[in-house]
Image (cartoon, helix red, strand yellow):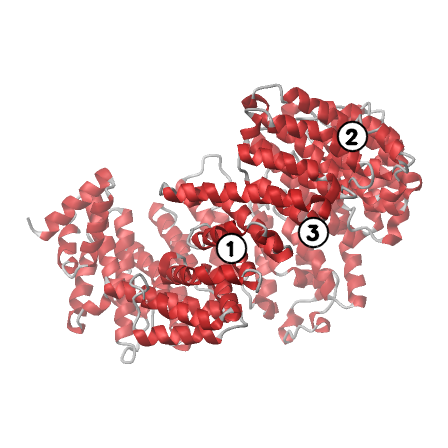
Amino acid sequence: MDHATAVENAVKRFYASGDNDTHAWLLQAQASPEAWTFVWQLLDPSKPGEVQFFAATTLHAKISKQWEEVPNSEYLGLQVRVLEVLKHPGTSKIVLTRLCQALAAFMANSSMSQLENSEKCMVEELIEILPYNSPATVGLFLRVLEAIPREFDRRQGVKQLKQRESILNNWCKAAWILQQIFSSCTQTNDNNSDALFLSGIECTLSWLKLGQLPLDTIGQIYPHLLLAAARYIPNRDNEEDDNARGWEVVQECLTMVVTHTELYKRPQLFWEWAKSFICMVKEHGAKYYYEILTTFGEAHSRTFLLSLANIGPNTEGQKWTAEQIKWTKDQQKLIAEQLIEFLLECSEQEGRYPVDEKRSCVPFGFWYALQDDLNTLDVAHEQQAILALKPIYSRLARALLKKTTLPASPSEAGTPDEIELLRCYRQDAADTLIYCYNVIGHDLLILLGQRLSQSHDNVSKWTEVESTIHAFKALSDNLNRKDFHYLTAIMDLMLSHIPYGMYPREVLCCACSAVGAYAEWIGECPEPWLERSLQLVVLGLTHGPITSPAASMALKDIVRECSAHLAPLAPSILETIGRTLPNVTPGGGEGLRLMYAAGELLKSLRTTEEQMSHLESTLGLCVMRLRELLQLPVNEARVAVSNQLKMISMFFTTLEGAICSPVLEALLPIFEGIVNHPDWSRDDSTLDAMYNCAQKSVSSLFYPEREAVSLLHLLDTSYKIRPHPAALVFLKQLVLVGGRNPAISDELIRVFGEISGLTLGGIASCRQANGNLSELSDLLEAYLLLLAQVCKKNARLLLQIPDQVPEMLRCGIACLLLPETATVKAAGCFLTNAIRQSPHMQTFIQPIGQELVCVILQCVGGVVPRNSLEPHAEVLLVLNKACPEWTAQWLRLALADRSAPVVPQPQKESFIQAVLRERTNKRRLCDKLSEFSLLCRQTATVGL
C-alpha cells in the first residue's frame, strides 16, 4: 500500500470514528517530508471531500510552517501545481478556501525569499499569476486576496518598518482592485455579481483587520461600504444566508472604519464620512444602523460634544488644519444633532424591552461617553456644553422612565430569559439616569417629584410610580448636597402620599429598596425620616414574601447607619421581626438580615432587662425551631438546621455586652443536643455551622476565658466523635482567648493535648495503611494552622505535651509534599513558626532537620510545581537563620543522597552556597529554589 492510500484510509477512518491515535498518526504524516508528494494525489477531484480537505489543509500547513524544505529552484513548479489544483472545476467551497490560503502563503514566503530583488508587491504578483478576467477567476482572485493579510502576521524576521511598508504597498493596490470590482458589480445586477460583491466585502474586512491603514485609501472604499450597508440591510422577514452574512461583514467593516484612531485628526474627512453615513441612514431608515451609529458616536463623542456646543476644536487644544473652514460650526452641529436624534429615537422605541423590541439598549454606552467628556473641558466650555446637552438628556430621562416600567401583569412578562434581560436593562437604565443627573441636575429630581405627585386614583398607573421610585433609588449615591431639599420633598411623597395598599406589591418592594439606599442620609437626618422610613419597612415586612426580602435589606441598612438613634423605636421593630421570622423563606438571606437587625436593635436598648424582654421573640424563635428540627432525620432537616445556626451566628455578630452570656447559655443545650445525637454529631454541614456559631458567641462575650470552659468540653466530646476542620479553627480561637489564663489554661491544655493526639493518631493510621493524605487535606490545613498559632502566641502550650511535638513536626514535613497549595502553605507556616521558637523548640528541631531538608529538596527537584515553592523557601530561610552550621551539613548530605536530584556537582555546590548566603530575603531565596528546580527538571528530561 503506497503512502497516499494509507493516508486516505486513515482520513476516512478518523472521520468515521474520531479515533485519537489515528489523529496523531495523521498529524505525523502531515509533518513528514513525504506529504509534499502524496498531497497532490489526494487533491484529485475524484477523491472524497474529507480527503481533499485534509490534503488542502496539509498543503497550507507545509507551505506556511515548513517552507524551508522547498528549494529555490522548485518555487515555480510549486506555484504551477497550486494554481492547477486551485482551478479544478467542482471543488467544494471549504477546500477552495484552504487552497487559496495555501497560494497566499506561497506568495508571502516566496516574496520574503526574494525580498531584495523583487520590485513588485504581492498583490501585483497575484494579478500576474491569477488574472481576474472572468467571474470565476475574479472569485478565486478575491479569495486569495482575502487570505494575504493573514500571512503578514506569520512573517518572522522582517523588520517592523519594512513590514509596515509592505502592508501599505499591498493595501493600496488591493484597494484599487476592490474599487474596480465594486463598481463593476454595482452596474451588473445578477447572481454572479452579488457573490463577487460579497467576496469583495469579506476581502475588505480581512485587510481592515490589519489595523491603521491609510485613511485616504480607506476613503476610496468607504462609499462602496455605504452602498453595501444599504444593499444588505436586513429588511425582509426571510433573510437569505448571503444577505445575512453580507450585513454582518459590512457592519464590522464600517465599525472598524469609523473607529479609526487617526480619523479625528482629519476633520474634513471626518465630517464628510459622518455626513454621507447620516444621509444613507436617513434614506434607508435608522432601525438597523443603531449599532454603527452608537459605535461612531462613542468613538468620537468629544468631537460631537464640541460641535453640539458650538465650541471650536482649536480652543480645546485640537490642532485642526485650514480644511476645518470648509465645514462651518452650523454644518457640524447639524450632523451631530442628527446622529443624536437617531440615537434618541433608538432609546425611545415603542414597545416593551425585550418582548416587543431589543434595540433600545444599544446606545447606553454612547450616553455615558457623551456626558463623561464634559470632564475634559475647561469650566467655561463645560457650562456651554451642559446647556447644549440639557434638552437631550431631559428627553432621554423621560424615555428611560417610560421604558423601565415593569410588565403590568405576569402574562406580559415573557420568558424567564426575557425577564432577566429586562432586569439587566433596568440596571443599565438606572446607571444612565445617573448620567442624566450629571447633566440636568435638580431638573431630574423635579421630574421625579412631579411624577410621584400625580393623582393615584388610577391603579393601572402603578408601573409609572414604580419606575419613578426605581430611578430615585438609582440616584442615592450621586446626589449633590445642594439638591437635598428636593430629596426631602421626594422622600415625603414616597413615605406619605403613595397608597401602597392599592398597588401591587412590586411598588412597596421598590420603595423599601429606595429607603435602604438612602439609609446613610437618614442617619444624618433622623428627624423625622427615621421613624417614617421604619414604618414603611415594617409595612414591607408584614406584606408577604414579595416585599419582605427588600424590606429586610432596607432594615439591615437602616439599623447599621442609624444605630445611635434606634432606642425609642427598637421595641416595636423587634416585635415586627418576631412576627416575621417564622414566615421567612428557608435558606434565603432574609432570616440572616433580620437577625442582624435584631442584634443591632437589642444593642440599642439601654438596659439588660429591656434586652432580655425581647430576646424570646428573636433568638427564642430560632432556639425553639432548632429543638423541633433536631428531632427530625438528618437528611430531612440538615439544611434547615444549618440555616438556623447561621441566623444565630449573624445575631452574635452585632451583639455585645452582658446579654451575650444568657444568649450562650440558651444555646448550650442545643449544642449538646447536636453533639450527643448519634446522627447529628456526625453531620459535617451541621458541625460546621455549630462551630461557626460558637466562634461568634465567644467573640461577643465580656469574659470569654471564663465563660468558654463549657464550650471546651463540647469541643472535646464532639471531636472524638467526628474530627472536623471547623473544630480546630474554633480551638485556635480558644487558644488565643485563654491560653495564658489560669481559669482555663489547665482545661485548655488537656483538651488541646487530646485533640492533637487524636489528630496525629489518625494521620499515622492513614500513612501506615498507605492512604492518601490529600483526602484529609482540609483537616490537616486546620490542624497545622492551629499549631502555627500556638507556636506564635503560646509556644509553652506545646511543651506541655512534649511527646507529641516530634510527630507534629513530621506531620508538617509530610504535608510539604502534598499537591494542595493551602495545606502546603499551612505546613510551611507551622514549621517556620516552630523553628523560630528557639530555644523552646531547638531540642525538637535538630533530630528532624535532616529529614526536613531532604523533603524540601524533593519538592524542589520536581514533586512541587516551580511556582509553588514559596512555603519551602520560607522554611529553609528560617532554618538557615536559626542553625546555619547544621543547615549546611543537612544540605550537603541531602544532595549526596541517592534520592537527591541528579545535578552536576558544581551546580550542587553553587546552590548550597547560594542558599547559605541568603538569610534575610525570602523572595530571593525562592527565586534560587525555582532556578535550581528548573535545572533539576532539565537534567531529568535530558536523562530520559
Q: Residue 691's spot in the image, x, y percent? A: 63, 37
Of tags 3 and 2, the one toward the viewer is: 3
Q: Note whether 196 is above or below 15 in the view shown.
A: below
Task: Measure how far apart labels 3 and 2 are at the Cα level.
Answer: 55 Å
Task: Residue under label 1, please give it.
Answer: 825
* Residue type at numbered disc 3: Arg
Task: Residue under label 3, please give it.
Answer: 740
Task: Measure how far apart labels 1 and 2 are at the Cα level.
Answer: 50 Å
Q: Nearer the viewer, residue 369 or 560?
A: 560
Label 3 element class: loop
Do labels 3 and 1 touch, CB within 8 Å? no
Task: Measure how far apart labels 3 and 1 are at the Cα level.
Answer: 27 Å
Label 2 element class: helix
Q: Is residue 341 left or right of residue 62?
A: right
Q: Quadrant of residue 486?
A: top right
* Disc number placed over residue 508 in the picture, else none: 2
Q: Can residue 338 be seen in the rendering of this structure?
A: no
